[in-house]
C-alpha cells in the first residue's frame, strides 16, 4: 500500500519544531490504488497514476488561469464537505505539478494552518477527488 509523506519533518532535536520545505511544495498524493468506500461486496477503488495526476494538473492549470483564482482550499478534517460543520482554511494550493510519478502542490498556509503544521498537530494531507469527473475503468475502479 502506498504511503503518504508527512507535511513536515522534525530535526534531530525532539524539542525543535517541524520544518517546512523551503520551496513550499508538498506531496498531495502518492501513486497507487486506494479503497475509498468499502462496501461488503462492492469496494470503490481509486486508481492514482500518472494519467490521473496529469489530468489533475491540466485541470488545475485551467482553473488557476482565472484572474480571481485564490487557490484550492486545504481545510481541516474535510469539514468544507459537510454543511453542518464550520470550515476554516488551513491553506491554499496555489500550484500543482506531477513529480516523480506523484502529485505535488505548492501550499500557502494560513497563519493557523502554518502553526498546526510546524507544531505537529497537522501532519498529513488527505485529498478528496470528485467522483463525478472520474474516469470509469470497469467494475468499481475509477481514475480521478
Image (cartoon, rainbow, N blue to C red):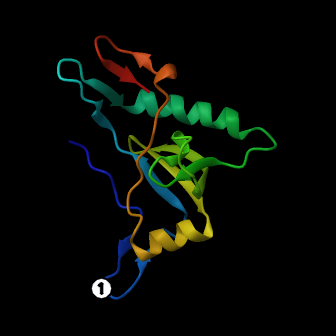
Looking at this rendering, what residue extends furthest in the top direction? 138
Q: For the point 35% across and 61% down, which residue is it?
A: 6
Q: Residues within 10 Å of mark 1 (few under 14, many from 20)?
A: few
Above or below — where is 75 with respect to 81?
below
Where residue 51 appears, x then y in whole percent? 43, 27
Check disc 1 and report its element: helix, strand or loop. Answer: loop
The image shows residue 37 at horizontal and vertical percentages of 30, 30
Residue at the (28%, 12%) spot, across then down = 139
Q: Is residue 39 above or below residue 118?
A: above
Q: Which residue is mark 1?
A: 14
Q: Do we see residue 20 in this rendering? A: no
Q: Residue at x 55, y 36 (%)?
A: 57
Q: Is residue 4 left or right of residue 65?
A: left
Residue 8 occupies quadrant: bottom left
Looking at the picture, tell me which residue is in the foreground, 62 or 72.
Answer: 72
> Is residue 69 at all visible to an observer of this figure?
yes
Amino acid at each position: 500500500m502506498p504511503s503518504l509523506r508527512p507535511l513536515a519533518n522534525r530535526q534531530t532535536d525532539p524539542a525543535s519544531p517541524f520544518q517546512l520545505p523551503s520551496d513550499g511544495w508538498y506531496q498531495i498524493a502518492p501513486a497507487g490504488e486506494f479503497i475509498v468506500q468499502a462496501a461488503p461486496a462492492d469496494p470503490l477503488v481509486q486508481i492514482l497514476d500518472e494519467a490521473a495526476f496529469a489530468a489533475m494538473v491540466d485541470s488545475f492549470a485551467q482553473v488557476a488561469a482565472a484572474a480571481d483564482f485564490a487557490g484550492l482550499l486545504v481545510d481541516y478534517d474535510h469539514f468544507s464537505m459537510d454543511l453542518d460543520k464550520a470550515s476554516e482554511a488551513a491553506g491554499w494550493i496555489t500550484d500543482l505539478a506531477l513529480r516523480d510519478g506523484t502529485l505535488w502542490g505548492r501550499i500557502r498556509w494560513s497563519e493557523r494552518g502554518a502553526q498546526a503544521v510546524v507544531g505537529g498537530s497537522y501532519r498529513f494531507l488527505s485529498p478528496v477527488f470528485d467522483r463525478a469527473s472520474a474516469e470509469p475503468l470497469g467494475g468499481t475502479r475509477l481514475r480521478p
